Image (cartoon, helix red, strand yellow):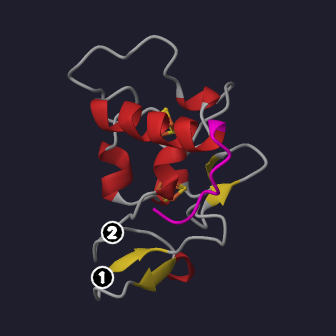
Amino acid sequence: MSRQRNAIDDIVPSAAPVAEKVCCSACDAVCCRLTVVVMPDDPVPRQYVERSVQGLDVMARDSDGWCVAVDHSRMCCSIYELRPAICRKFAMGSSYCREEREKYRTRFDQGIELHLL
Ligand code: SF4
Ligand code: SF4
């Protein structure tokens, strides 16, 4: 790949047109702060998985709230080929993507500390 591959880039295309300026390569991997449930047949290395208080297998997150699989030097997924199915379905430019980006931007702009979502 010649270009930087971000966390949930190049996945199932959204049915809706991608909003202008919404691009994984210009994003702080905002969706990688969400709870990511890991299914039994997901090929995620188990050291990245933890058990939630609800008893679900989820991607572990670091103290700043990002999935532990985020490569912070490039803000992209370090296990891209092994990422969970739910990550593959999260569409760049979808309404969910834009909502999370807006929530993140608002909190960041207001100087509100970013805790786990
Ligand atoms: S929030 Fe949207 S733009 Fe940002 S990394 Fe995730 S899919 Fe890409
Ligand atoms: S597994 Fe990869 S794409 Fe999924 S949340 Fe973690 S860093 Fe993001």
Q: Does the magenta-highlighted stretch encompass residue 111?
A: yes
Q: Residue furthest left?
A: 15
CB under 8 Å between discs 1 and 2: yes
On the image, the x and y values in percent for residue 102 come to 46, 33
| Residue at 38% over, 51% down | 87
74 shown above or below 85: above
What is the x, y in percent for residue 83? 45, 58
* Highlighted magenta segment, given as a residue range: 109-117
Query: In the image, what residue type sits under mark 2?
Result: Val
Q: Residue at coordinates 56% horizontally, 44% vertically from top-left? A: 107
C-alpha span from label 1 to label 2: 7 Å
| Residue named by callout 2 | 37
Q: Is residue 17 left or right of residue 84?
A: left
Image: 79 above or below 97: below
Q: Which residue is mark 1?
A: 56
Q: Position of residue 113 (x, y in %)?
A: 64, 57
The mark nearer the N terminus, 1 or 2, is 2
Asked whether residue 7 is in view, the answer is no
Q: What kind of residue is marked 1?
A: Leu
The N terminus - image quarter: top right
Q: Secondary structure under badge 2?
A: loop
Residue 17 placement: quadrant: top left
